[in-house]
Image: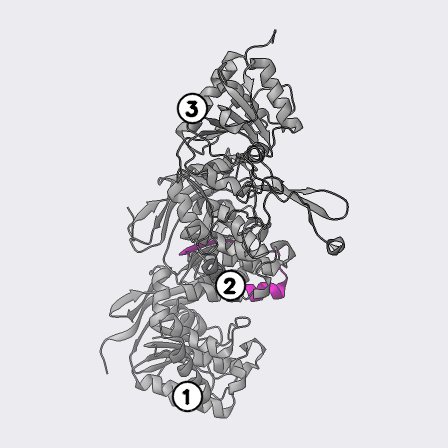
């Protein structure tokens, strides 16, 4: 395995100050260290409230840590997401990190096929090629053709989740962050998603995920990273 | 006339207006503000033109005044009398004989010469006014030659009428720099302004602006490449003199749809008739009675 | 003068006072090509003053706005000549007002409205101007049959589309928007937002969008600046500012609205 990690977290500190509630401070992460190499899948584990989601969101720069560093390999350089400018972070998200959230943030009126193809279009892939790749993924995920021209806002939870997954896997991101990607799926689709995740790992992607489903966790995870609450265990 | 200065205005005022005129001549098409005076007739009756004429007229000048091409309308007669009274200069109805021609809404058909001056009466000097109400903004647009909006108006004409329907006060670009309102002359007269040997002065009394086109200056009517400027044409010849190349007025001759087309330039028409040209003399008839 | 020659807009220390009243105070940021910056805050927070200072409409009391033009030259907006600034404003830049009546000529047809910028830069073939206007009407999803209609016969949503087309026809690189979906019905808002989003992406437009509607910036803006009493109190990635707001005022703002 490569010795150079794709993600290197050192001393990550994240707390929330609730100014609207009298300035209460909720410490969540305190000195988290984590390295993830290409071709491995790290499963975040721990009780509810232990900071799994907070860590995952911090890795996407969706949350803003107070201290430490999150160094990711990005197009031949190393970028610290904690201190990088928003402009830089956007570039990292565009090329390097894919993120599957629990819920699809549906854009009104945009057809499912376009939602899925959009990350490719942003990278400058021609419309036809992007659409073809998006369609192939939606095929695998059993989103029937007639639905693809509809906006996902009206889809069921499971259908939205599959569109969401397709959107994040349509680009071969070097890093993938997965927040309960199979939560709303039936067995058949769950198996497909597991297969897709394994393919990503096989091509060398570094994957970090939260999976409540033990079966999924066992079939994709190489390693478990346990968070215990306020102070993370190594 | 006793009690009044020559040409009614006092010499200081004339001097002020002459300075405005000089500036206007120096910057062709540019509207020069001036201190417009109260005249013994209301604004809108040609006070701008009268003040310009009063400032340039001398004892040796010969004055012609036309209104819509005619020398004998109320406005033309009043102004001609006004100057006859206040200056004692000779007046005329013959275009060729005049050294100063004050006009409302026409340019004479007979080409003007380098020793003549044409003075226009102007109601609204600002060609951009239809689109922009603020004077500060229109001045800035002139200063920066931001004239795109003028074509918006022409575009609108074509979109609505299938052609540029603006038929009078048709905007022109002077000396390749300033867009100018030629006063409400028919666009038929626009080509006459281009490289005219005579000096053209424009006075707007109510709006307090003077502008000018010096002799032999480029005056281009705005247009589109695929909808070029065209002047009006008529199917008919002048019923009186048979002219086919002059601007014709439509005159109603009876209450049964009878019409007659005659030269709007009365002097031009009369001169042609004196030279032996004749029209059909017959009214053109439209409608149900035409078959009789 | 800019440390980031590739930025489209570099703003430093931008301040505007109205007598003793502070419009905006010491605002600075960079904007890159293709990037959309959202500016949020309550009424009176200085958003519109900032937008006016950025877009060349209102001269700031202090600070600079530097724009990198198509040739790579950096232009200090308030140091260049007025003709140059006005030329930039009607070619390289666009301005979408909240009330489309402020940005549309109500007395000329839709087609003429869209064609104006083309004519302003010298287009003199009626047929070409009309074809281009038609293409833009389709692009903003307006019915081509309405091309010769007067704007006063249009609905609010249509007027806003017209205003957008009228701006984009000159292929600007930077568009300023002041509450672009304000005053519209919710269903119309959604369609317009979607249209704006698509146009911004397809054309690679950079934009500064001022709004008090967090849903608008969530969909449109890459980055966010939160303004309060004329100052920027927080900036960052849009989703980060909305999901993990740091400043007390931002937290209040985010918690005061329904989930976006």
Marks 2, 1: nearer the viewer? 2
Q: Position of residue B129 (x, y in %)?
A: 55, 39
Above or below, B66 relative to C254:
above
Contact flag, marks 1 and 3 (Cβ < 8 Å): no
Region in magenta:
C172-193
The residue that mark 1 highlights is: A194
- C-alpha span from label 2 to label 3: 47 Å
Q: Position of residue B34 (x, y in %)?
A: 51, 23
Q: Nearer the viewer, residue C152 or C129?
A: C129
- C-alpha span from label 2 to label 1: 49 Å
In the structure shown, which secondary structural element does the residue marked by tag 1 occupy? helix
Q: Residue at x 45, y 80 (%)?
A: A165
User: Mark 1 Cα within 10 Å, few/some/many (few <14, many 20+)?
Assistant: some
Above or below, C135 relative to B283:
below
Q: Position of residue B278 (x, y in %)?
A: 59, 40
In the structure shown, which secondary structural element does the residue marked by tag 3 occupy? helix
Q: Residue at x 51, y 86 (%)?
A: A145
The residue that mark 3 highlights is: B22
Marks 2, 3: nearer the viewer? 3
């Amino acid at each position: 395995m490569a010795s150079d990690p794709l993600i290197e977290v050192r001393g990550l500190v994240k707390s929330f100050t609730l100014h609207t509630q009298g300035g209460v401070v909720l410490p969540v992460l305190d000195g988290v260290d984590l390295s993830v190499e290409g071709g491995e899948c790290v499963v975040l584990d721990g009780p509810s409230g232990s900071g799994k989601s907070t860590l995952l969101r911090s890795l996407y720069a969706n949350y803003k840590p107070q201290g430490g560093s999150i160094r990711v390999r990005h197009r031949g350089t190393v970028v610290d997401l904690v201190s990088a400018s928003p402009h830089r972070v956007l570039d990292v998200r565009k090329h390097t990190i894919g993120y599957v959230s629990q819920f699809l943030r549906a854009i009104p009126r945009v057809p499912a096929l376009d939602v899925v193809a959009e990350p490719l279009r942003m990278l400058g892939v021609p419309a036809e090629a992007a659409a073809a790749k998006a369609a192939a993924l939606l095929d695998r995920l059993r989103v029937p053709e007639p639905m693809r021209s509809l906006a996902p806002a009206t889809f069921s939870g499971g259908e939205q989740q599959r569109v969401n997954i397709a959107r994040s896997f349509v680009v071969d991101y070097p890093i993938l962050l997965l927040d309960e990607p199979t939560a709303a799926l039936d067995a058949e689709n769950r198996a497909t998603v597991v297969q897709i995740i394994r393919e990503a790992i096989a091509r060398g992607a570094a994957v970090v995920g939260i999976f409540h489903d033990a079966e999924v966790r066992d079939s994709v995870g190489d390693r478990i990273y346990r968070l215990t609450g306020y102070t993370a265990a190594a | 006339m006793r009690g009044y200065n020559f040409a009614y205005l006092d010499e200081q005022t004339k001097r002020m207006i002459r300075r405005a005129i000089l500036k206007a001549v120096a910057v062709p098409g540019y509207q020069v503000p001036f201190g417009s005076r109260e005249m013994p007739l209301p604004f809108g009756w040609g006070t701008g033109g009268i003040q310009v004429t009063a400032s340039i007229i001398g004892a040796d000048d010969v004055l012609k005044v036309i209104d819509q091409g005619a020398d004998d309308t109320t406005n033309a007669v009043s102004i001609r009398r006004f100057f006859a009274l206040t200056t004692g200069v000779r007046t005329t109805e013959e275009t060729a004989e005049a050294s100063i021609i004050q006009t409302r809404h026409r340019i004479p058909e007979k080409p003007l010469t380098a020793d003549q001056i044409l003075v226009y009466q102007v109601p609204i000097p600002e060609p951009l006014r239809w689109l922009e109400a603020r004077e500060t903004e229109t001045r800035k647009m002139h200063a920066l030659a931001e004239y795109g909006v003028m074509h918006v108006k022409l575009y609108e004409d074509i979109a609505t009428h299938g052609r540029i329907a603006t038929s009078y006060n048709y905007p022109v670009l002077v000396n390749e720099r300033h867009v100018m309102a030629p006063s409400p002359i028919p666009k038929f007269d626009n080509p006459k302004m281009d490289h005219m040997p005579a000096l053209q002065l424009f006075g707007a009394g109510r709006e307090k602006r003077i502008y000018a086109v010096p002799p032999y200056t480029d005056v281009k009517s705005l247009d589109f490449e695929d909808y070029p400027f065209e002047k009006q044409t008529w199917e008919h010849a002048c019923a009186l003199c048979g002219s086919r190349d002059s601007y014709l007025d439509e005159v109603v001759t009876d209450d049964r749809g009878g019409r007659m087309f005659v030269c709007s330039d009365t002097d031009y028409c009369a001169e042609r008739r004196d030279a032996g040209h004749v029209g059909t003399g017959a009214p053109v008839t439209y409608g149900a009675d035409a078959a009789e | 003068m800019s440390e980031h020659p590739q930025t489209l807009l570099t703003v430093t220390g931008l301040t505007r006072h109205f007598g003793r009243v502070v419009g905006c105070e010491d605002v600075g940021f960079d904007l890159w090509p293709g990037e959309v910056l959202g500016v949020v805050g309550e009424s009176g927070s200085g958003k519109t003053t900032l937008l006016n200072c950025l877009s060349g409409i209102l001269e700031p009391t202090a600070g600079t706005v530097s724009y990198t033009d198509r040739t790579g030259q950096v232009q200090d907006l308030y140091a260049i000549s007025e003709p140059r600034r006005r030329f930039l404003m009607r070619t390289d830049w666009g301005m979408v007002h909240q009330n489309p009546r402020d940005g549309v000529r109500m007395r000329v047809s839709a087609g003429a409205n869209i064609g104006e910028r083309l004519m302003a830069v010298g287009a003199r073939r009626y047929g070409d101007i009309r074809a281009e206007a038609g293409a833009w009407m389709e692009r903003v999803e307006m019915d081509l049959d309405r091309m010769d209609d007067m704007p006063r016969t249009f609905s609010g949503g249509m007027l806003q589309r017209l205003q957008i087309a009228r701006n984009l026809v000159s292929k600007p690189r930077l568009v300023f928007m002041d509450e672009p979906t304000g005053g519209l019905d919710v269903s119309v808002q959604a369609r317009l937002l979607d249209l704006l989003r698509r146009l911004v992406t397809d054309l690679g437009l950079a934009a500064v969008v001022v709004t008090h509607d967090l849903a608008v910036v969530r969909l449109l803006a890459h980055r966010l600046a939160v303004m309060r009493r004329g100052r920027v109190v927080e900036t960052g990635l849009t989703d980060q500012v909305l999901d993990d707001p740091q400043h007390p005022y931002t937290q209040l703002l985010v918690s005061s609205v329904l989930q976006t």
